[in-house]
Amino acid sequence: MSGKINIAIDGHSSCGKGTLAKNIAKELGYIFIDSGAMYRAVTLYMLNTGLDLEEVAQDPAVLGNIKIHFEFNSEKSFYETHLNGTNVEDEIRSMRVSRFVSQVSTLRVVRDFLVIQQQEIGKNKGVVMDGRDIGTVVFPDAELKIFMTASPEIRAKRRYEELIKKGVHVNYQEVLHNIRERDHIDSTRKESPLAKAPDAITLDNSSMTKTEQARLSLSWAKGVIKSRENQ
Ligand code: DC
């Protein structure tokens, strides 16, 4: 056995899941996979080829034309998303993709297509994956599951400040409304809704710094790794 574990990080939008997952992976020398990036890559492919939701639902074979892989960028210390051989890391974060991705991620055929690939990435362990259904569907056997949350107001404030810093004109109420709406869609959709796995540890980071969250989560991860070594 490699001694490595898989770590599943799920939670609401704008909770800082990606940052936490990245920090844990870096510290443990694990691979970090942003599963949302895979939903975004499928969405970008559909937008670029003009495929609509119905066409994909009726003919899932078209998904076979989509090849997603991750490549490590050592300068950024980050795995970047590639779609059919092209680096699409920036493009998948555009508003064009963000507007459509939540609808694409409700499609059963898309979820099945991506979950198989996510499970393949995790089969040798040593993966930290963040998303909405990682602890419940993708890695139900993950040795450590973290469910992140924070109040909608706090998440909206963080997101608002981030956008203002980037020079994007938004108003706080608008950001808060969007976060509440996404929480609702993610938690009530029919296919793999956002849910806390029964064996996940809740991490409410409403009043925690990024360093505190990373330190606490790493102590959990190291505890699990150590207890397995002693078995
Ligand atoms: O984490 P994110 O905001 O980049 O995710 C983009 C979209 O993909 C979001 O609408 C939720 C969806 N998603 C999902 O349904 N399941 C996952 N495991 C990850 C993301």
Image (cartoon, helix red, strand yellow):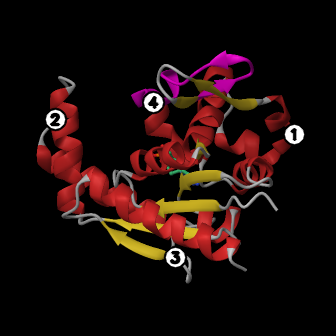
- Provide the residue designation for mark 2: 170
Which of the two labelled residues, at mark 3 and mark 4, occupies the earlier sequence position? Answer: 4
Residue at x 13% of width, y 50% of height: 173
Question: Identity of the amino acid at label 4?
Answer: Arg
Which of the two labelled residues, at mark 3 and mark 2, occupies the earlier sequence position? Answer: 2
- Provide the residue designation for mark 4: 93
Q: Is 148 rendered above or below residue 102?
A: below
Label 4, ligand 1: CB separation under 8 Å: yes
Bounds of the magenta segment: 80-96
Which percent across, then down, holds residue 66? 77, 30
Which of the two labelled residues, at mark 4 and mark 1, occupies the earlier sequence position? Answer: 1
Alpha carbon separation for disc pair 3 and 4: 28 Å
Residue at x 59% of width, y 52% of height: 129
The image quadrant of residue 230 is bottom right
Quadrant location, the N terminus: bottom right
- Picture mark count: 4
